[in-house]
Image (cartoon, grey):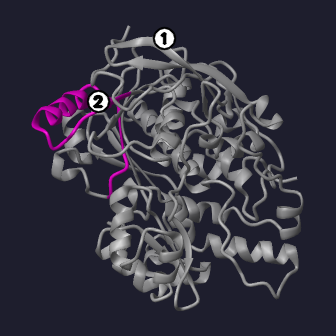
């Protein structure tokens, strides 16, 4: 029987967390196959869900944490199970022309077109009508890597399909070869954080500015809110909302909008920074420096801060500045780094159909996004521990590609086990499928900017899979819109 901490232990030690605390992390044994995948997604989901250590340092309470693998992989698809007033949110994860297409060189390319400017930009490159068939016909005139390169030049989002071998030989794959899934870097000096109160939850009294969108970053912010943090989601009024995702990933947060190109809003952000504890952002590396909110800027304005950064392909290599960090990028990283080919090969072996053409196969959920979000929250907790024990300002770095590399390092399952015994995801229905019925929780959504205390709508969502014995997570609804709240912090007792 495999050690249930085999994946968690290296993460814990890499972030310099005490070994004795691992004895209080209770993970289900033999977690895979928790879902129908040849990768150990149950192991990955379990290992990335823990947030108790900071609580112990602040309260001396020895907190135990339990995570069930199947519950964890279901939470890895939480956006699919959210309902408002008994209805599923409108829309889908991808728009009608996003997806995988065959190319002239008998390969494939994946397009991301969820935002209008990306959709139109790719249509301009392809010079075709906005239909799947027209896009498919146009892409048969392109080699996959050529289209990927042109899309990058035009600041659009598309990725060529690669195998693991091809990714390992790619300059970006080589640049990431020894990169851990979570990195902590000291970015400034500051006194040790004072423990100045009695706390009932791990992150009570911690203020978080969440400048992220789509899945990975918002999942991180949602996790911090569930453990007691005051999370203020800040989005731009110039960007479109994402109703399919925003409702679920905003649970427990307050939401406001600021245009950082507007001097008044920029000044408001600078004021918020001075009283925040965690600055969470998912712009491309260096993307906020021009606005005065890079890691060093924020650490200078607020000594002792934790600056958490999320990106797609990391901070080194030729792809470090690619546009993906603000966009939906899990599927793109899966495609680029070999997972779609490897999963397809395993499924073909299970089906024993060697004559059939190999069709790229994605994970059954956006596993890189969710794992990255939880690992970023884990890194934030570790950095907060350092502010107590050592002082200083810290940056936490997580990239989807490095998280994928970590999942790959966990090993594979035999195809017969993966697809013969792995349980598929339940259907997305209202009322929820019987497996989900025991795992959902009900709450109320928050009201308008003028009256934030008003509760207007009933919401249901899958419960958080990490169970803390002494401090159950907060299960709250989401803001009704992205401008529901004022751009200010809640008063602290």
Does label 2 or label 1 sit earlier along the sequence? 2
Q: Quadrant of the C terminus?
A: top left
How many other residues sit within 10 Å of disc 2, few (<14), some (14-19) or many (≥20)?
Answer: some
Q: Secondary structure at mark 1?
A: loop
How many other residues sit within 10 Å of disc 1, few (<14), some (14-19) or many (≥20)?
Answer: few
Residue 109 position in % (x across, y down) = 52, 77
- Whether residue 342 sits left or right of residue 187 in the image: it is right
Report if residue 270 lies within the magenta region: yes
Q: Residue at x 68, y 74 (%)?
A: 342
Camera-near label (2 vs 1) is: 1
Q: Contact (CB < 8 A) between labels 2 and 1?
A: no
The image's mark for residue 309 is: none
Q: In whole angstroms, how far apart are the C-alphas of marks 2 and 1?
A: 21 Å
Magenta-tinted stretch: 255-284
Q: Is residue 53 above or below residue 415?
A: above
Q: Is residue 411 above or below residue 160?
A: above
Report which residue position mark 1 lands on: 198
Residue 136 position in % (x across, y down) = 52, 78
Residue 88 position in % (x across, y down) = 61, 36
Q: Nearer the viewer, residue 274 or 290?
A: 290
Q: Residue at x 56, y 24 (%)?
A: 56
Q: Residue at x 65, y 76 (%)?
A: 341
Q: Secondary structure at mark 2?
A: loop
Q: Residue furthest top?
A: 493
Report which residue position mark 2 lands on: 191
């Amino acid at each position: 029987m495999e050690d249930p901490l085999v994946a968690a232990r290296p993460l814990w030690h890499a972030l310099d967390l005490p070994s004795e605390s691992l004895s209080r992390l209770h993970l289900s044994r033999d977690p895979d196959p928790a879902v129908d995948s040849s990768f150990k997604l149950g192991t990955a989901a379990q290992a990335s869900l823990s947030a108790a250590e900071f609580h112990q340092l602040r309260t001396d309470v020895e907190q135990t944490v339990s995570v069930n693998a199947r519950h964890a992989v279901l939470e890895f698809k939480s956006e699919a199970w959210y309902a408002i007033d008994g209805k599923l949110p409108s829309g889908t994860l991808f728009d009608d022309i996003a997806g995988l297409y065959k190319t002239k060189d008998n390969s494939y390319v994946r397009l991301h077109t969820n935002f209008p400017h990306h959709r139109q930009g790719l249509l301009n490159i392809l010079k075709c009508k906005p239909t799947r068939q027209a896009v498919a016909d146009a892409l048969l005139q392109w080699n996959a890597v050529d289209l990927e390169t042109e899309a990058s030049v035009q600041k659009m989002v598309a990725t060529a399909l690669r195998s693991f071998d091809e990714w390992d030989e790619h300059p970006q794959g080589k640049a990431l070869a020894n990169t851990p899934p979570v990195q902590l870097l000291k970015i400034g000096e500051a006194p040790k954080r004072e423990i100045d109160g009695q706390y009932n939850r791990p992150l009570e009294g911690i203020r978080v500015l969440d400048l992220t969108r789509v899945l990975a970053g918002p999942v991180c912010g949602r996790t911090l809110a569930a453990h007691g943090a005051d999370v203020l989601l800040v989005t731009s009024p110039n960007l479109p909302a994402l109703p399919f995702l925003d409702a679920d990933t905003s649970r427990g947060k307050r939401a406001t909008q600021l245009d950082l190109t507007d001097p008044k809003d920029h000044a408001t952000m600078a004021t918020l920074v001075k009283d925040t504890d965690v600055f969470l952002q998912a712009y491309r590396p260096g993307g906020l420096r021009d606005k005065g909110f890079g890691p060093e800027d924020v650490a200078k304005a607020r000594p002792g801060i934790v600056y958490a950064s999320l990106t797609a392909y990391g901070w080194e290599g030729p792809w470090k500045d690619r546009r993906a960090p603000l966009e939906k990028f899990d599927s793109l990283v899966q495609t680029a780094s070999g997972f779609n080919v490897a999963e397809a090969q395993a499924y073909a072996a299970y089906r024993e159909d060697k004559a059939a053409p190999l069709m790229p196969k994605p994970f059954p959920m956006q596993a890189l996004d969710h794992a990255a979000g939880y690992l970023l929250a884990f890194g934030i907790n570790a950095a907060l521990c350092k502010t107590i024990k050592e002082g200083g300002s810290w940056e936490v770095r997580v990239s989807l590609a490095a998280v994928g590399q970590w999942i790959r390092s966990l090993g594979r399952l035999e195809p017969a086990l993966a697809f013969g015994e792995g349980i598929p995801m339940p259907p997305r229905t209202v009322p929820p499928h019987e497996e989900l019925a025991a795992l959902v929780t009900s709450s109320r959504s928050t009201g308008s900017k003028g009256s934030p205390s008003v509760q207007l709508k009933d919401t249901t969502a899958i419960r958080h899979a990490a169970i803390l014995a002494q401090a159950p997570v907060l299960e709250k609804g989401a803001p009704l819109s992205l401008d529901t709240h004022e751009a200010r912090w809640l008063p602290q007792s």
